[in-house]
Image (cartoon, rainbow, N blue to C red):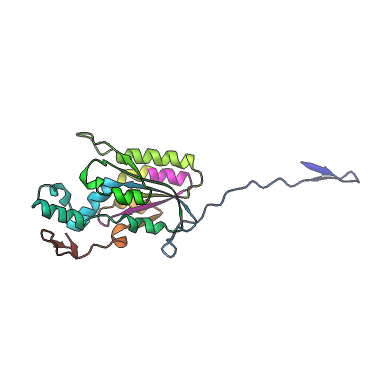
Amino acid sequence: MAQSTTDGIVIPMPLPVPHTPEIPDPPTAAQPAYAGRKVAIYWDFTNVIVSRYGAVHGKDSWQTAAKTGTPAERKARYRAARLDIQAVVSVFAGARIVVHRAYSDWSSPWSSGYATPIQRHAIDAIQVFPVAGAKNGADMRLTIDAVEDLHAHGEITDVVVVSGDSDFMPLVQHCRRQSRFFTVIGSRGHTSRQLAAVADHTIFYDDLAPVALCDTPGVDQRNGGAA
């Protein structure tokens, strides 16, 4: 584009500078508040329940959870390992939560018991039916939904996955290609090292809701916490 002056000299006009939307810096340890950010949160709920139970009662304890002790003792163990959803949601105070979903078999007793906090925090409970002999399909459904949400909601700056499963590595890679930041929230010792290494930010649930000492009958003390 050019503009002519009165003396016939042609002066080139500057080209317009294309607008590039600003992507905020990733949250840091000094400023983890996510204030002003647009966040999509996805819970691999069954994974989180199992991981929390293992963190409280010992690794692989979930395998015998339904068979060990009396009904009262089993109930006490479940209660000691109950998730504090508010502790996770409070991390994102000041952020705009654009999408908030949790994936599980909500007909199971260990998931259905969270109906009240799920409703209180306006979390969309996605039913994932168990398939005999097959791997839990929640991670696949979650990943597909997250990819679709990133395309449908261009304002999302951060994807948060509450899980320790290494199967979410492809989602991390997709977020990077889309210039979105990825946060993983999982239990210490039950979160994939590979996933934590590639995430922009890793938060351990144990730091948000520490394991408290417990004197409930049938609940053992291990690793400085209730089991």
Residue drawn at (79%, 42%) of the image = 2
Asked which quadrant contains residue 202, the reply is: bottom left
- Count of residue discs: 0
Looking at the image, residue 145 lies above or below residue 184: above
**Percent position of residue 37, x then y:** 48, 54
**Percent position of residue 117, x then y:** 32, 52
Q: Is residue 175 magenta?
A: yes
Screen quadrant of the N terminus? top right
Screen quadrant of the C terminus? bottom left
Residue drawn at (33%, 54%) of the image = 185
Q: Is residue 194 visible?
A: no
Q: Is residue 82 visible?
A: yes
Looking at the image, residue 199 lies above or below residue 213: above
Looking at the image, residue 213 lies above or below residue 125: below
Q: Is residue 95 left or right of residue 207?
A: right
Q: Is residue 92 magenta?
A: no
Q: Which of the pair 33/11 is nearer the observer?
A: 33
Residue drawn at (47%, 59%) of the image = 35
**Percent position of residue 215, x then y:** 14, 65
Q: Is residue 6 left or right of residue 55?
A: right
**Percent position of residue 100, x then y:** 39, 47
Residue drawn at (33%, 47%) of the image = 43
The segment highlighted magenta reads 171-189
